[in-house]
Image: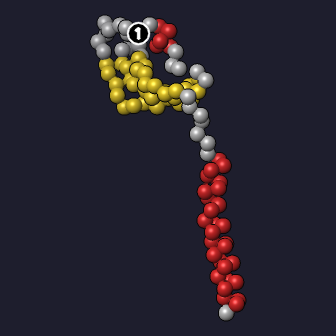
Amino acid sequence: MKMNKKLIIAVAGIMILLLSIPAILLSQSYSEPSIDRTLTKAICNSRNYCEDYNIACKNNNVVSIKPTGYAVKFSPTWKDPREEKDIKNLC
């Protein structure tokens, strides 16, 4: 009877240890970059096709750019009303 309790405790301890290893490894290997600002911005090409992006910034540097899935195609005569500095400065 004493041997069975020890065996059960040992097996349970090993199982807990094995089940916790993936969580420990994931928590140490993955760290989200710290973000201090997010915004959306349309980025247009030379043919007036503009796509909207989610932009994440940290210390005025781009951390990530992900498309939102929204886009628009303007006529060939369309001029972007934004100032040049606002178009180029993503953060």
Q: Quadrant of residue 48?
A: top left
**Residue 27 image offset from top left, x and y in percent:** 62, 50
Circle 1 — which element?
loop
**Residue 19 image offset from top left, x and y in percent:** 60, 65
Residue at 52%, 15% in the rendered image: 89
Q: Above or below — where is 83 with respect to 19?
A: above
User: In the picture, which quadrant includes the N terminus?
Assistant: bottom right
Residue at 39%, 25% in the rendered image: 52
Q: Above or below — where is 75 with respect to 37?
A: above
Residue at 43%, 25% in the rendered image: 40
Q: Residue type at mark 1?
A: Arg
To which residue does mark 1 refer? Answer: 82
User: Across the whole image, how many numbered discs are drawn on residues?
Assistant: 1
Which sits in the foreground, 76 or 34? 34
Horizontal arrangement in the rendering, residue 73 relative to residue 24 (left or right):
left
**Residue 73 image offset from top left, x and y in percent:** 31, 19
